Image (cartoon, rainbow, N blue to C red):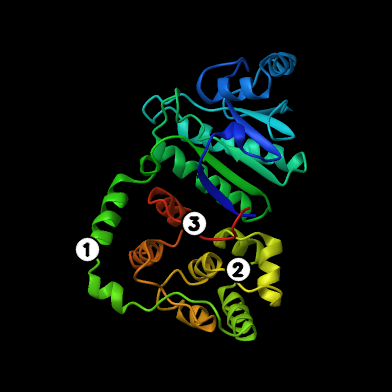
Amino acid sequence: MPIRIRNADITKIKADAIVNAANSALIMGGGVCGAIFRAAGAERMRAECEKIGYCPAGGAVHTSAGALFAKYAIHTVGPVWRGGCSGEEALLRSCYRASLALAKELGLSSIAFPLISAGIFGYPKEAAMTVALSEAQNFLLENDMEICFALFGDPKEFLNTAVYRSLSVYLDSVSETEIKNAASMTAGGSEAAFCRVLSRAFTESGRSGEQLSGRANIGHKRLKELFSGESYPKKEEMLALSVALFGDVCRASPLLESAECRFDGSKKADLIVRRLLETGCKDICFINLALFAFGEEQLGERLE
């Protein structure tokens, strides 16, 4: 299943598990923690947390989700930011690993995270986002789960400032002539041709199906449909596969052309993807974070 970044209230998200940015005592706090307690039913969640009693930084425990749109609430304790030299990153990574491992143990297929430690614990948002996405992607290289990050605030705050500025300058510099002359992104090629090119590119990549799924942000089931020709790829899936298999605009051409697709110079999303590939970025999660920052549709399997 794919990773999705959303500007949303986590207490309103439907998922098998909602992750609470907890404190070690598992008591109702402020910020996200307080909001989750109130939405779930504060007294009920307080009683369940009291039975557990304690969770160390970097660990995760679970309770029922009460009135949330979920089966479980997973409580994880992030580090307080102390400048970055006190093991904060290792603890933050442990939060995501422990939460995802617990969700897997519980047999869940979807999970929603806030950006752990990036609120009152003071972890810089950009750095916290980098950790969150890398741990989610690493998990999906061997597992299949829908992972959502529910963020609060200005979307561009979560992207590297220099990258945001560079992309803004690039988008502003694209001339009207380039836009008018750019080939449009269409879909309508032969399914058989697409399947042949996709299968050949996959074989040559040497990656496993799980690795391709994680790198393309497309779930295992959906990937099988695309390989078998049962379903034709959407534009966001086509670009995601191009990033995962080639990571290069020119090398991706055969796959795109098999579906009669090209980068559309009149579309901001296509320009952002093309620019990041040209500058050497091959990380689908980072590309999607950039698209999120500019309010554009993310690449990969589209969630309902």
Residue at (60, 65) in percent of width and height: 212
Work out how far the residue at label 1 is from the one at label 2, CA to CA, in angstroms: 37 Å
Residue at (64, 49) in percent of width and height: 146
Q: In this image, 199 relative to 256: left or right? A: right
Q: Where is residue 59? Give x, y as percent.
A: 62, 29
The residue that mark 3 highlights is: 298
Element under label 2? loop
Residue at (57, 23) in percent of width and height: 35
Task: Give 228 or 294, whichever is nearer the viewer.
Answer: 294
> Compared with residue 99, is residue 219 higher up or lower down, i.e. above or below?
below
Q: Amino acid at mark 2?
A: Arg
Task: Give 247 or 238, whichever is nearer the viewer.
Answer: 238
Element under label 1? helix
Which label's residue is closer to the chain start, 1 or 2?
Answer: 1
Q: Where is residue 14? Give x, y as percent.
A: 66, 40
- Determine contact: label 1, label 2, CB under 8 Å: no
Disc 3: CA contacts within 10 A as few (<14), some (14-19) or many (>=20): many
Q: Where is residue 240? Give x, y as percent.
A: 52, 65
Work out how far the residue at label 2 is from the one at label 3, CA to CA, in angstroms: 23 Å
Disc 2: CA contacts within 10 A as few (<14), some (14-19) or many (>=20): few
The residue that mark 1 highlights is: 173
Identify the image quadrant of the N terminus.
bottom right
Element under label 3? loop
Which label's residue is closer to the chain start, 2 or 3?
Answer: 2
Which of the two marks, 2 or 3, is nearer to us in this view? 3
Q: Amino acid at mark 1?
A: Ser
Disc 1: CA contacts within 10 A as few (<14), some (14-19) or many (>=20): few
Which of the two marks, 1 or 2, is nearer to us in this view? 1
Q: Where is residue 16? Give x, y as percent.
A: 71, 40
Work out how far the residue at label 3 is from the one at label 1, CA to CA, in angstroms: 23 Å
Task: Give 134 or 153, whichever is nearer the viewer.
Answer: 153
The residue that mark 2 highlights is: 207
